[in-house]
Image (cartoon, rainbow, N blue to C red):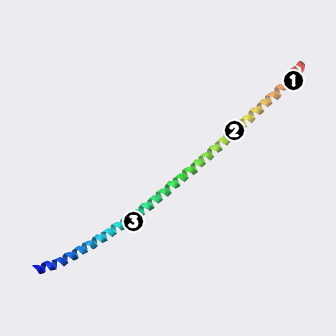
Amino acid sequence: QTELVVRAVPAKAVAVRATAAVAMVMEAAVMAMAVAVTAKTKVATAALLAAHTAAQTELVVRAAATKAGAVRATAAAAMVMEAAARALAMELLSALLMELPMALPSVLMRA
């Protein structure tokens, strides 16, 4: 029995060492997975940040284009208003020139 116990103790020690080695390998694998997940998370975060920045840039560009469009629309409206003002001025001038010959004698008579 003593011999069996003596033989069993080293066998148990070997089994314990093997279990410890397996546990260390598993721990290393878990750590490697954690590092990989962290790296993937960092890459994903960087990609999301880049996409967010690109989206913001696109929004700024669209806003600038919208503002430029609004400026063009305002300029076009100003040109239309200017053309209308010129047409009105020409119409008034024409009416004044037509009325002047009729009004001139009465003005001269009053003078």
Q: Pick whichever, 40 or 4, lies toward us.
A: 4
Which of the 4 image quadrants contains residue 26?
bottom left
- What's the amino acid at mark 2? Val
Q: Which residue is rendered at x = 57% and y = 49% of the image?
A: 62
The residue at 19%/78% (across/down) is 10
Spatial separation of the CA atoms under disc 3 and disc 1 = 99 Å
Image x and y of residue 19, in percent: 25, 72
Residue 68 rendering spot, x and y as whole percentages: 63, 47
> Which secondary structure, mark 3?
helix
Q: Secondary structure at mark 2?
A: helix
Query: Disc number at residue 36?
Result: 3
Q: Residue furthest bottom?
A: 3
**Residue 79 x/y as whole percent:** 70, 40
Q: CA distance from mark 3 to mark 2?
A: 65 Å
Q: Which residue is mark 2?
A: 80
Name the residue type under label 1: Leu
Residue that carries the numbered disc 1 in the rendered image: 104
Q: Percent position (x, y) of residue 36? A: 39, 65
Q: Left or right of 91: which side holds 48? A: left
Q: Can you say which quadrant of the picture contains the C terminus? A: top right
Q: Residue visible at 80% across and 31% down?
A: 93
